[in-house]
């Protein structure tokens, strides 16, 4: 059976889910029909469905991905005002891990000039280790489409007045779609070394192999 993925285009645990429980009912169907589940969310409501996720885990792979891009609750409140705090997300991650679920962090997007610091990256890896996270998958930078750029730069001026962030963005990236962190290579090297030290996976191929490895179907060959 395959794995049903959620969260690529919209968060499956948006505020309406608390009352409507559409994601929960979908997971019940995933479980009933013998599929696996891969969930990406910026919320903490995923812990409500640990009972279903552990039931799915009995027969199929389950991958739980929580987006965390800063270890600083104050900064998170500014750039993600409608999301749970980073601390709350780390706590959710710890609950998932404690229940045996394959859980980790999506470290993306990492906002240039705000989140792409060595201190932030090191703090996230350390706290991930403390929660029992199995993996962190990063992207050191962000993307900006033409119709997003003006809005984003205006918001930077509103949230961080007087810091000149919009000017710094335009000076460095101009109208580029991809806005890589200033020291993406250096951050990656530091990040990879720290993950290795803690035994945290960070390469996509390794993450996929690890969460599926106990569910590989093997068949004896008639010619063996």
Image (cartoon, rainbow, N blue to C red):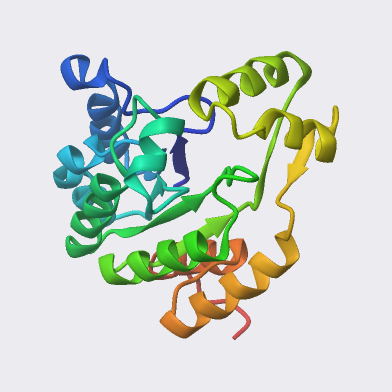
Q: Is residue 138 left or right of residue 142?
A: left
Q: Position of residue 112 (x, y in %)?
A: 65, 45
The quadrant the C terminus occupies is: bottom right
213 lies above or below 204:
below
Instruction: Residue 157: name its quadrant.
Output: top right
Furthest residue in direction front, as rendered: 162
Q: Position of residue 158 (x, y in %)?
A: 53, 20
Viewer-side residue, 27 vs 98: 98
Q: Position of residue 198 (x, y in %)?
A: 42, 80
214 lies above or below 171:
below
Residue 112 visible to an observer of this rendering: yes
Q: What is the tally of numbered marks visible in this picture? A: 0
Residue plotted at (68% across, 18% down): 148
Viewer-side residue, 22 vs 35: 22
Q: Is residue 110 left or right of residue 82?
A: right
Viewer-side residue, 35 vs 126: 126
Instruction: Residue 105: name its quadrant.
Output: bottom left
224 lies above or below 184:
below
Instruction: Residue 170: name its quadrant.
Output: top right
Residue plotted at (47% across, 48% down): 69
Residue plotted at (44% across, 50% down): 70
Q: Is residue 117 left or right of residue 47?
A: right
Viewer-side residue, 208 vs 31: 208
Residue 58 visible to an observer of this rendering: no
Residue plotted at (42% across, 48% down): 68
Q: Position of residue 53 (x, y in %)?
A: 24, 47
């Amino acid at each position: 059976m395959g794995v049903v993925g959620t969260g690529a285009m919209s968060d499956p645990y948006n505020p309406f889910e608390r009352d409507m429980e559409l994601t929960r009912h979908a997971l019940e169907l995933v479980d009933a029909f013998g599929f696996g589940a891969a969930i990406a969310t910026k919320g903490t409501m995923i812990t409500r469905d640990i009972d279903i996720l552990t039931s799915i885990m009995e027969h199929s792979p389950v991958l739980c991905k929580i987006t965390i891009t800063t270890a600083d609750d104050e900064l998170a409140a500014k750039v993600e005002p409608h999301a749970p705090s980073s601390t709350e997300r780390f706590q959710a991650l710890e609950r998932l891990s404690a229940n045996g679920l394959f859980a980790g962090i999506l470290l993306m997007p990492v906002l240039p000039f705000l989140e792409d610091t060595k201190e932030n990256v090191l703090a996230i890896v350390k706290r991930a280790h403390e929660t029992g996270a199995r993996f962190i998958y990063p992207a050191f930078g962000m993307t900006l489409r033409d119709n997003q750029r003006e809005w984003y730069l205006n918001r930077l001026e509103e949230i961080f007045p007087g810091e000149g962030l919009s000017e710094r963005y335009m000076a460095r990236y101009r109208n580029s779609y991809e806005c890589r962190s200033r020291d993406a290579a250096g951050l990656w090297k530091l990040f990879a070394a720290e993950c290795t030290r803690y035994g945290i996976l960070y390469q996509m191929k390794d993450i996929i192999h690890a969460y599926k490895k106990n569910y590989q179907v093997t068949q004896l060959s008639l010619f063996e």
